[in-house]
Amino acid sequence: MSNGFFQIVNFPKGSYVIVEGKKEAHNFFIIRQGKVRVARENQVVGEDPNQLLGPGDFFGVVAAMSQHAQIESAIALTDVSLIQVSYDQFGTLIQKNTPVAMKIIRYFSMKLRQFDSTITRLSFRSAVEEDPNQLFAIGEYYFNQKNNLHAAYAFQQYLQYLPNGQYATQAKLKLQTMNQPVAAAPIDYTKFNRSYSDNEMIFCEHEPGRELYIIQNGKVKITKIVDSNEVLLAVLQSGDIFGEMALLDNKPRSASAIAWGDIQLLAINKANFEGMVKAQPQLATRLITLLSERIWTAYKQLANLLITDPQGRVADTLLTLAEKNRVRVVAKASYNFEIGTKDLLKMVGLAYPKDENLVLDLITKNKFIKLDQGKLSCIDLLELEKLVQAYRKKSQIDQKLKKRA
């Protein structure tokens, strides 16, 4: 059955609507009637492995919009009637039902914030929760690094949001020392187009968020201060969207954004966001696709942390790198990772050169993984996938035995 744009599909009680791990998933579903249970065999830290959904809820969006394999299974708990939407119909869905699109965007924002918080906690154990009070500490870090431009921005934001805060006097003194004004030049939030010069801070971690940004031209660095070091999280380019989580869930920024060269941005604020989504459905489609990709990546990172064998985590990271680039995982499919053992160990959170033998031993035991002139490659991705599945099964068995003990 079809309503002219989206197909209405029905499943009897006990049916699998989607299956975890299935590749080339092109559709997602909105529940019209009945109840559906969403479950994951590969459980992740901080995630409920079983979720009960009802009318108005949706599932399968991450796989459909990111065009990766399904990260969950959905089982009909009753006879169910569903609206089936293909990924290339998302723009039509937005035009016909903007509230549904907004619900998906807000849910994804919440889910991504949750995943990012868990990853930060597990990867950077000394990281602190987002809090405007921390803006002073960020300013102090940059001041000690003699980066007056960023230090002034952080101190000015601290004084803007906490004018009578514990460190207000110290912040003003630091700004005087740097010959910087107490208040930054005001931003005209009615203007969509913004320009920033090289190394200018667009926003600072812990700063309350008001806007999301689309890069029109240039590059943006995303950084975070961890253990008194500035960690580079990502480099974004033209067409990329950033800052969307703070815009959608009213929480402070989880990282800083800094111009890398002269850049032009399109800024969208909370007041005009929903109208912009309705007027430009391609924006919401781009945002959902971006969020889907980030959630898929975060899910893979969290699932990786549950593999107890460090060699299994190394193998899983290699497989994820190939999957991120949408390489088909089939027999004899090859892929050049363009990284060496040092970068790979860094991705897994292991130390170089101390843990390099873990990678070298993995290569010795599995001839389909190669190291040539310092670069890693795989000559059979299906074998790599089987290896990762074996490590996952072993980890699941180990966890069950540990719970029983």
Image (cartoon, helix red, strand yellow):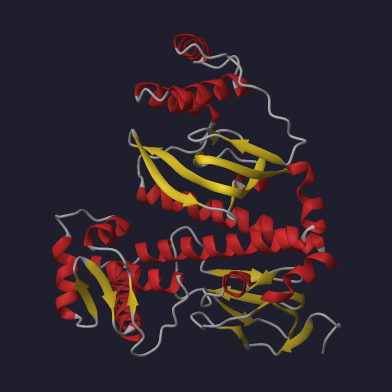
Vertical placement of residue 181 versus 195, above or below: above
Query: In the image, residue 76 lies at what x, y percent?
Result: 65, 82
* Number of numbered discs on residues: 0
Q: Nearer the viewer, residue 47 or 174?
A: 174
Note whether residue 357 is visible.
yes
Which residue: 80% across, 60% down?
Answer: 99
- The quadrant of the image that shows the C terminus is bottom left
- The quadrant of the image that shows the N terminus is bottom right
Splitting the image into 4 quarters, where does residue 402 fall? bottom left
Which residue: 25% across, 70% down?
Answer: 376
Vertical placement of residue 299 versus 76, above or below: above
Query: In the image, residue 197 lies at what x, y percent?
Result: 54, 34
Q: Nearer the viewer, residue 401 or 341?
A: 341
Query: In the image, residue 254 lies at what x, y percent?
Result: 51, 42
Query: In the image, residue 288 lies at what x, y percent?
Result: 65, 62
* Left or right: 335 in relation to 7: left
Vertical placement of residue 239 versus 175, above or below: below
Q: Nearer the viewer, residue 199 or 33?
A: 199
Which residue: 56% across, 75% down?
Answer: 67
* Left or right: 252 in relation to 8: left
Which residue: 45% across, 13% down?
Answer: 178
Note whether residue 405 is visible.
no
